[in-house]
Image: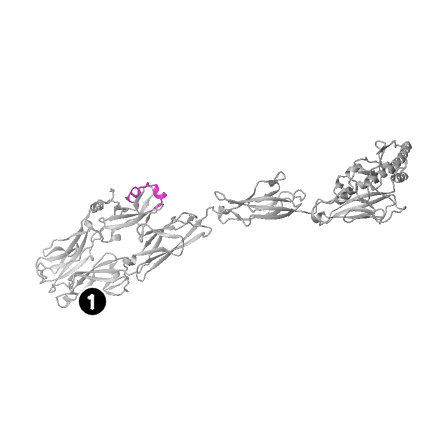
Amino acid sequence: MMRLGLETAGALALLCALLGTQCADGFRKIRYSVPEELDKGSFVGNISKDLGLEPRELAERGVRIVSRGRSQLFSLNPRSGSLVTAGRIDREELCAQSAPCLVSFNILVEDKLKIFEVEVAISDINDNAPSFPTEELEIKIGELTDPGTRFPLKTAFDPDVGTNSLQNYKLNPSDYFSLAVNSVTDDAKYPELVLEQALDREKIAVHQLDLIASDGGDPVHSGKLCIKVIVLDANDNPPVFTKPEYHVSVLENVPVGTRLITVNATDPDEGFNAQVSYILDKMPGKIAQVFHLNSVTGDISILKSLDYEDAVFYEIKIEAQDGPGLFSRAKLLVKVLDVNDNAPEVSITSLTGSVPEEAPAGREIALISVHDRDSGQNGQVTVFVLGNLPFTLEKSIDQYYRLVTAKSLDREQVSQYNISLKATDQGNPPLSTETHITLHVSDINDNPPTFTHTSYSAYVPENNPRGASIFSVTAQDPDTDKNAQITYSLAEDTLQGVPLSSYISINSNTGVLYALCSFDYEQFRDLQLQVTASDSGNPPLSSNMTLSLFVLDQNDNMPEILYPALPIDGSTGVELAPRSADPGYLVTKVVAVDKDSGQNAWLSYRLLKASEPGLFSVGLHTGEVRTARALLDRDALKQSLVVAVQDHGQPPLSATVTLTIAVADSIPDVLGDLESIHTPANPKDSDLTLYLVVAVAVVSCIFLAFVIVLLALRLRRWHSSRLLQTSGNGLADIPASHFVGLDGVQAFLQTYSQEVSLTSGSRKSHLIFPQPNYADTLISQESCGKSEPLIIPQDLLETKEDPNLLEVSLFL
């Protein structure tokens, strides 16, 4: 087929129709022409070219046929871009006798939401032969009938149109009859049998004739009617209708069985020749199924409900036949009037199931088609959106509307819309139809995760197990899917020069914080963490919160005894208590500290064990060791005390220290008693013993002089001594030179005591006379630093005579 350009005038449109071409006008109407009875898939027109597209773009851009109410006659070939037939097309079934036969539908380009109107003219081919209502026709003619009398014959019917329709009739040669063809009010041809000469029943009683009806197609098709002429007498007049054409208008909703009109035909003959009967002539379509003709009365009534939308106009052919068989014809034109019996039809041509939030106003959602099968005011439809929703309808072409957003949407406020559209016609009463569209609002990452508070506080006891969960943080994100998937992390920081990640870790998915180490309250008591919550959007959004983590103290440190300190030379400290001491005399003081805090660091002292029960007492809170009674001569020189220091934690922890107290009034007494206890095991040490005795005597004299000096200094140091007693912090700084060695234990000398140190390794002994220390004070570091210890070897305490003693040195 050839293709012409745009339709510009009526002449060009006529030319397109005659040549079987298609034309497109300025209103995007595309016209094609195709003959009927083509095979399925036959080419109709190059639709891709007429749309300005390449064939491959038909599928990519969603080009499809949109038709209404009837089966699909055409389809698109995506490979060639052509419009092809979807099946066999029968023009007679589609348009009956109408000419031209036009089929209209729309082409939708979905990505642009554009509609193109397509009109295809179905041209007729000669596929039907003319046919008569019956195969035989019997005509009775009176023998007195005058020559030239005409007898109407049955007309042939050819459903084709144009030159392919019925064109002429032909009668086989006869001496008595000829054929005449007449046209009445339309182009229809009515054959008549003409009597050429008078009949003579006595010669020929029955005449057999053949009436041939032929069309103008190529090849020519024809139909035959066998006419049997019976010669009778008298009846020479056919029935005659009162009107050649009847008109009636009827509402489409009239009940079945309603009488529309009564036709009437009369016959001037008498008797049997005047008896008229009515019949419906053969008609195309289903007219005979819609109307009923009473053959006796001529009443025409309705057999089936009328529908204005199916047919607006009916043309009924009626025959009136008398008794002998003469008949005449008339037409009944029935006009169907529309009533508002059809609600509007709303169809969704194209739909977007979701729209992103914050999309600008005017975002297309759906393309909607509205149609009402009624006509006039009954078919005028208005459509609108129900409810107070952020959507509006915009008129497109024809009866198409675009549903668009009226403003930006927010998924966090409304995540899904159920949109109701209502279409109402203008009939009385009006009819309406509702349709519903579900629209999902897709999420974008427009909300960061948020914590309930900007800062939190958590408490964890020290000595916690490694890997223990210590706190959990939770952030909320109103977005959805990946935009709401939250990941937790800790900000980089250091604590005491060590990365914070060495102490704390966080589960990135749950926000649970874990301790990577066991916390020590004595190392640090609190730390600050910054937790970041980030979502998985693109780009990701985040927020921060501050966590203050406080370490709670546990009773994990036992008391540490500062004085008397544990010696490192294998000796035992000895405290000196004069026998003349009164009850309550301060012998020494146990000083201890606890690294814990609070109640865990409150210390109490008690006497756990004593070699002489009831002789000494220990202050509960001070740790002072005092005499509980006066010392007696029977009391042993060496007294051993075990003092326990206990904190108030749960459970309580404690430490013990063993004190050795020498009961004597002076250093010589101590030494004398020591010699009575210690006898040299080796006779070679006798010289050392002699030297020792001489040294002790000299030292005693010097000591008496030194005491006088100490008394003079007593007043000057009184004030400083009081300060040392109240503070108690100087005890940790007392050097080891303030102690004497005896039995491997260290002891602090009290007032008027002498330090004696005997060494066997160097075979020398040292007698040191330190400055006096009063019962209620502790020796300061300054005064103690002036003397060196007197070391007494362990074997001297065990043997009274030691021949290995070589030398006695005196230090002032």
Quadrant assignment, res 562: top right
Residue holding disc 1: 297
Q: Amino acid at mark 1?
A: Thr
Quadrant assignment, res 211: bottom left
Quadrant assignment, res 59: top left
Q: 197 above or below 762?
A: below
Quarter of the figure with the C terminus: top right
Left or right of 484 on screen, residue 547: right
Q: Is residue 48 magenta?
A: yes
Task: Please state the horizontal and vertical placement of residue 806, each as a whole percent of the image.
Answer: 88, 31
Q: Nearer the viewer, residue 244 or 173?
A: 244
Q: Nearer the viewer, residue 204 or 162?
A: 162
Task: Please state the horizontal and vertical placement of residue 192, each as a whole percent of the image.
Answer: 13, 57
Q: How many marks?
A: 1
Quarter of the figure with the N terminus: top left
Could one spot residue 748 in this view of the protein? no
Q: 58 above or below 765?
A: below
Left or right of 482 on screen, residue 262: left
Q: Provide the secondary structure element on which disc 1 rests.
A: loop
Task: Please state the horizontal and vertical placement of residue 312, each as a whole percent of the image.
Answer: 25, 58
Provide the residue span drawn in magenta: 41-63
Callout 1 environment at 10 Å: few (<14), some (14 to 19), or many (20+)? few
Could one spot residue 416 in this view of the protein? yes
- Which residue reaches farthest bottom? 271
Q: State how the image is colored.
A: one colour
Q: Is residue 18 magenta?
A: no
Q: Nearer the viewer, residue 651 or 262?
A: 651
